[in-house]
Image (cartoon, rainbow, N blue to C red):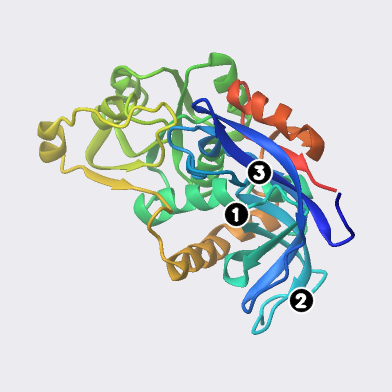
Amino acid sequence: MANSRDMKSCWIKSEGGKTAFEFRDVPMPQPKPGEIVVRTGAASLNRGELLASIGWHGLDQPKPAGRDLSGEVHAVGEDVTRFRVGERVMARAHGAFSEYVPVSEHLVVPMPDRLSWEQAAAVPIAFVTAHVSLYTYGRVKAGEWVLIAGATSGVGVASLQAAKYAGAKVIGTSGSTEKLDRLKSLGMDAGIHARGGDFSAQVMETTGGRGANLALNLVGGSMFPGCLKSLANQGRLVIVGYVDGVMKCEIDLETVHGKRIEISGVSNAYLTPAERAGGARTFAGDLRPAFNEGRIVPVIDRVFPFDELPAAKAYVENNSHVGKVVVRIP
């Protein structure tokens, strides 16, 4: 039976090649030096975590689920200088589907006043990933054409919003025309209905035969050839994910060589704590003003109560959402 020092936490496990959630009563965390404990207000789901084949949680044993949250600082550890108890924050944190979560203060960002708990919970992974992809590796510039393969996902919608904030023109792809129509209100300049294959002719037509200056592949190997063929001379291709499960594909070296294409990958798998902290700082410097000014408002598809987290998981796995799916945590 739970005691007064326990909290409710959701864990993820592998069952028959799939993932499943289970609720547990676990001890409340205490902050270590350099950490804060956040009382969670909301947390968002990330499809990559739910895929047993490539999930962040691994397949060996159950682990605390959830990766990004918003909430209020509940306690601070020794040497914490940037935050005080009671401040509203958002962070990328392991075990975000818990009532209280410990996290390094260097991975925490002050929560913009304009945002609700649910909106702020949609920011950390989606927008930090979009920022690294567009700004750090993509070096996006105003007036450029940006192709986003998988534009209706959480990271895809965030990338669309961040690219428009930078003054770029955006082409988005999706396997659903209905989803693409929903992105027009966010400023998407053109939508392409595609599930892999060669969609480069449509990109070339849209860009007046020049091609996209920057392509973000959020889908995986099935979209790689089309993204590569759609690029302009000296284009940049950033590989962000592989939710399609296609981990290998052929590379047209003639195109890469002839057009002088630059290919990069974006992942947190091998980042050091200092690199993760640096990414949080640069994101806050570049994009936090957009949230404060109301120029970017995170897109929330649906909000579930905490105890309906398994239903939220099923909803995400059904792939009918546009933007982020969030759980409200009391």
Return the x and y of residue 109 as percentages of the image width and height.
Answer: 64, 64
- Compute the Cα span from label 1 to label 2: 21 Å
| Residue visible at 53% across and 16% down in the picture | 176
Residue closest to the eye, 173 or 140: 173
Q: Quadrant of residue 171?
A: top left
Label placed on residue 11: 3
Mark closer to the chain start, 1 or 2: 2
Which label lies toward us, 3 or 2? 3
Marking on residue 94: 1
What is the secondary structure assignment of the residue under circle 3? strand
Circle nearer the viewer, 1 or 3: 3
> Which of the 4 image quadrants contains residue 292?
bottom right
Vertical comparison of 71 with 223: above or below: below
Q: Are marks 3 and 2 in contact (CB under 8 Å)?
A: no
Q: Which residue is mark 2?
A: 84
Q: Residue at x 67, y 64 (%)?
A: 102
Residue 132: image location, x then y, percent: 44, 53
Q: Which mark is residue 254?
A: none
> In screen coordinates, is 39 left or right of 315?
right
Q: Which badge, 1 or 3, is on the more N-terminal residue?
A: 3
- The residue at the point 60 percent across, 20 percent down is 318
Q: State yes or no: discs 1 and 3 in contact (Cβ < 8 Å).
A: no
> Hey, what amino acid is under mark 3?
Trp
User: From what the image shows, is residue 274 above or below residue 242?
Assistant: below
